[in-house]
Image: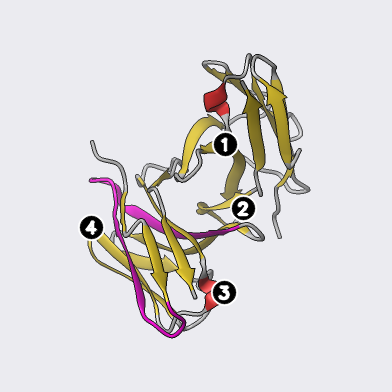
Amino acid sequence: GQQLNQSPQSMFIQEGEDVSMNCTSSSIFNTWLWYKQDPGEGPVLLIALYKAGELTSNGRLTAQFGITRKDSFLNISASIPSDVGIYFCAGPNAGNNRKLIWGLGTSLAVNP
Amino acid sequence: DAGVIQSPRHEVTEMGQEVTLRCKPISGHDYLFWYRQTMMRGLELLIYFNNNVPIDDSGMPEDRFSAKMPNASFSTLKIQPSEPRDSAVYFCASSLGTGTETQYFGPGTRLLVL
């Protein structure tokens, strides 16, 4: 079945550093979603990507839809303490786009 | 507008007891999803509804789990009887039926079954 593999599994960085994480799959996805989960809360959508090659920014966040449609990456520039959390990639199930396939997440810790 | 509301936020119960989790979706959203999150398995979709009708319950782990949506503003997920392995965070999410996959999550219910 479809799976999403996220790397790295966890990151510990210094405030001000840039962060890069990615999501890969052996299957093609037509949409890539990046969510962030703050500690003790539910995931919140950060960026949605709908076209291969698309590069989209949301403040200090930038995400790209890989041209093979099998990968996506998320960059965070100039990290700050509130960037702490778990970042998930997700994409719609090929057979039913209402069902999302989720990666296991990248856990980010930022040292002030 | 208020987001997705879930209650209770925390639940501690003993094995064998019935547990009921509640969710109020965002007004106007016609899709509602129940997820379970654990460290080992991540986010798993349990069931989702469209216009109050269950569409896909293939993720419900076993007959001990049941979900209902009696109206557009309320849904429940019930576990009876509960077992320690049901300990997890349960999320409710809702979305619009516009073709977008954007789902809005509630804060979750942290369930611990002793």
In the image, residue B68 above or below residue A93: below
In space, the residues marked 3 and 1 are separated at their CA atoms by: 25 Å
Name the residue type under label 2.
Ala
Residue at image point 49% right, 76% down: B114
- Name which residue lies at 57% across and 36% down: A85
> In terms of secondary structure, where does tag 2 sit?
loop
Q: Which residues are magenta?
A: B14-38
Circle 2 or circle 3, nearest the eye: 3
* Residues at marks 2 and 3 touching, judged by CB atoms closer than 8 Å: no
- Using the image, name the chain to which the residue with label 2 belongs: A
Give the chain letter at badge 3.
Answer: B
Q: In what element is the residue under mark 3?
A: helix
Disc 1 crowd rating (10 Å Cα; few below 14, some 14-19, many 20+) is: many
Q: Amino acid at mark 1?
A: Gly
- Say which residue label 3 marks: B85
Q: Earlier in the sequence, mark 4 or mark 3?
A: 4
Between marks 4 and 1 in the image, the one whose residue lies nearer the viewer: 1
Q: Position of residue B17 (x, y in %)?
A: 39, 82
